Amino acid sequence: MDASSLRIFKFDGTNFHAWKFKMQMVLEERDLWEVVSGEIKAEQCVNQLDQAAYKTKSRKAKAVICLAMEDSQLPLVRSASGACDAC
């Protein structure tokens, strides 16, 4: 799915439940939800290839989450080290 085809309102501090559900759908569609939900944890990655894939997915998921937030809400996630910390 192309990002330009998504019609998700940014999180503005008042629409959390609807935004959260829509973000989960986006992250699932992009195969990133498992790192956000904690289904897969960094500690479970035993080799360097798995660790690199986890880090890549986590960075991508954090970017998707942050780009779907109004600037006023970014302090909530700015210090998060990965996607799991951003939620």
Image (cartoon, rainbow, N blue to C red):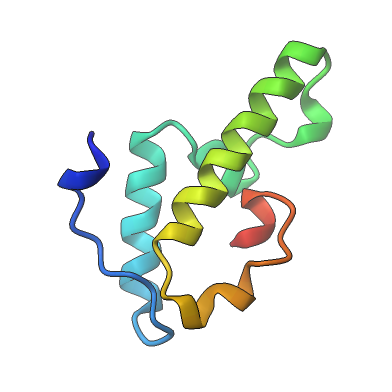
Which x, y percent locates residue 75? 62, 77
Which x, y percent locates residue 67? 43, 58
Q: Classify residue 4 as left or right of residue 78.
A: left
Q: Classify residue 23 as left or right of residue 43.
A: left
Which x, y percent locates residue 26? 34, 46
Q: Quadrant of residue 38?
A: top right
Q: Quadrant of residue 31?
A: top left
Q: Quadrant of residue 15?
A: bottom left
Which x, y percent locates residue 9? 26, 69
Judge whether 11 appears above or below 22 on screen.
below
Residue drawn 55% across the image and 37% down it: 34
Q: Classify residue 44 as left or right of residue 78.
A: right
In this view, the residue in front, 76 or 32, is 76
Residue drawn 51% across the image and 49% down it: 63
The quadrant in which the N terminus is found is top left
Q: Classify residue 4 as left or right of residue 21.
A: left
Number of on-image labels:
0
Residue drawn 73% across the image and 37% down it: 41
